[in-house]
Amino acid sequence: MAASRPLSFIGVILTIIIAFCTEFGNCNNGRRVGDVESDLSGVSVPLEHSFEVDDVPRFRLRGTIQVKAGRDLSVSLSQLSLSEEDRNALKDVAAVDGLYRVRVPRLSLQTDRETDRQPEGHLSAFVRACSLVESRLSDVITLHTDVSGHIIGVSIVTVPGSCRGAEDEEELNLEVFNTTVSVMAPVSAPSPETALFIERMEQEMDKKGKPQEQKSFFAKYWMYIVPLVLFLMMSGAQDQSGGGAGGGAANGGGR
């Protein structure tokens, strides 16, 4: 009985400590207090697909993309398996070289409550159904966002992305998707050094401006300048010869 009292006393102390940690969140468990909410917060983006022989889109749920913001962006995807009816329909669409479409709603990936609102339409992309069949449902889906975190586009590619038709479709496993999903945000390009560029241009103009202006003037108008100089030289020679003949005639008349 004496040995059981210390054990019960320690159990009571541990219970009090656990209750205190749970209530006030002051225990050092390797995370900050606000990390609990950030781990649990996130945005769910429904992923829908459509593949129809008549090429009239009729979208249904394929899975859900879960995006969690934090120190590192976390993206995960949970998907439904294709039923036997869907597998047969996908093969039929591939046989007529139809399209396989996916779409996501236009919404924000920000978890701020003030930005929560109803999505404004959908964004879609497509690939050839035969490429999805021959890739055994292996595809890459990318969500493109703007600087504010709003989804502005979606893209899908299959791996491989060609339709060769070399394999027997009956032997292909078309039940479970093998998908790689990612989110691509815009990257700010380095700003150009405009002031330095203008300064260098001005220096180059100062060095090459005047000689280039003289050269360009003579190069452009030489066909006018040369005849004018020749004309002036010939006119001066004629004046000199005319003056000399007139003086001789005057002297002869005097005699």
Image: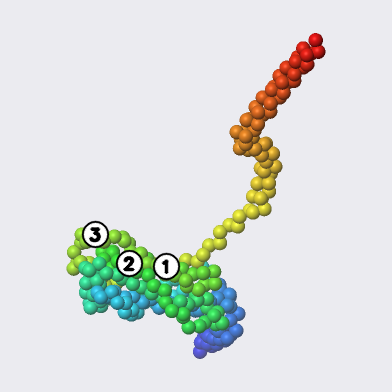
Label 3 Cα neighbours within 10 Å, binned few <14 / some 14-19 / many ≥20: few
* Residue found at x 51% / y 65%: 186
Marks 2 and 3, the one that precedes in the sequence: 2
Q: Which quadrant of the structure image shows residue 93?
A: bottom left
Q: Which quadrant of the structure image shows residue 169?
A: bottom left
Q: Which quadrant of the structure image shows residue 53?
A: bottom left
Which residue in the protein does label 1 denote? 142
Which residue in the protein does label 3 denote? 164
Left or right: where 115 falls relative to 178: right
Which residue in the protein does label 2 denote? 127
Tell me the number on the disc at residue 195.
none
Label 2 Cα neighbours within 10 Å, binned few <14 / some 14-19 / many ≥20: some
Q: Secondary structure at mark 1?
A: strand
* Residue found at x 56% / y 86%: 19
Q: Secondary structure at mark 2?
A: strand
* Disc nearest the viewer among 2 and 1: 2
Is the C-beta separation of discs 3 and 1 under 8 Å? no
Rendered location of residue 84, percent (x, y) = 22, 77
Amino acid on which disc 2 is placed: Val
